Image: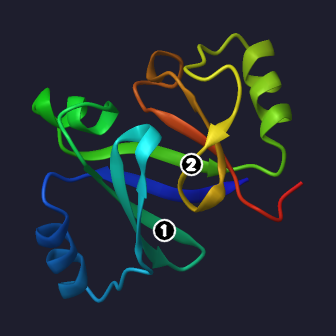
Amino acid sequence: MRIDHLGIAVADLEQALESYRALGLEPTGSEEVPEQRVTVTFLPIGESKLELLCPTGPEGPIAKFLADGKKGLHHVALAVDDIEAALEKARQAGLRLIDERPRRGAGGALIAFVHPASTAGVLIELCQRKGSH
């Protein structure tokens, strides 16, 4: 297992991109994920990525996260080869799941979230990319 990406909630995508570009990071493009009401931009770092998450409106999990006065790190995404098996293992371990079944995420990945109450306060995303499994 490895870290696929770190999800970072931002209110202003262009301003955030300026900061990350100043650090030498370049985005690979942006994608709107309508189901999550968010625009996603990935910044590769070695084998992992930073994922900037900017809400497209006042609804959705990232908009609510920002409205609660939070900002910055939103989640840690772990790359898995078989998301169904990873969910079953988490379920058997008694972890609280936000997603009982995988759903589509950015870049066509299958994703599912584990509630932070089960993971020492950190929202964990399980992420199976195309070509895995």
Q: Give the mark, 1 or 2, whose residue is nearer the N terminus.
A: 1
The quadrant holding residue 104 is top right
Q: Quadrant of residue 18?
A: bottom left
* Quadrant where the C terminus is found in the figure: bottom right
Please indicate whether residue 87 sits to the left or right of residue 46 in the image: right
x and y percentages locating residue 90 in the rendered image: 73, 23
Q: Which mark is in front, 1 or 2?
A: 2
The residue carrying mark 2 is: 105
Circle 2 — which element?
Answer: loop
Whether tag 1 and tag 2 are in contact, CB under 8 A, the answer is no
Q: Does residue 54 lie above or below 59 as drawn?
A: below
Amino acid type at circle 1 is: Lys
Residue that label 1 marks: 49
Seen in the picture, residue 97 relative to 30 is either above or below; the reply is above
The spot of residue 88 in percent (x, y) is 82, 23
Question: At which x and y percent is residue 42?
Answer: 43, 69
Binning the other alpha carbons within 10 Å of mark 1 as few (below 14), some (14 to 19) or many (20 upward) gives: some
Q: Residue furthest top?
A: 94
* Dot 2 amino acid type: Gly
Disc 1, SS? strand
Residue drawn at 61 percent across, 23 percent down: 99
* Residue 45 image offset from top left, x and y in percent: 47, 77
Image-based side of 121 in relation to 130, left or right: left
Tell me the residue at 48%/68% (across/down): 49
**65 w.r.t. 37: above or below:** above
In depth, the one of 113 and 14 nearer the eye is 14
Q: Is residue 2 above or below residue 102?
A: below
Residue farthest to the right, as pictured:
133
Residue at point 84% right, 44% down? 82
Q: Residues within 10 Å of mark 2 (few under 14, many from 20)?
A: some
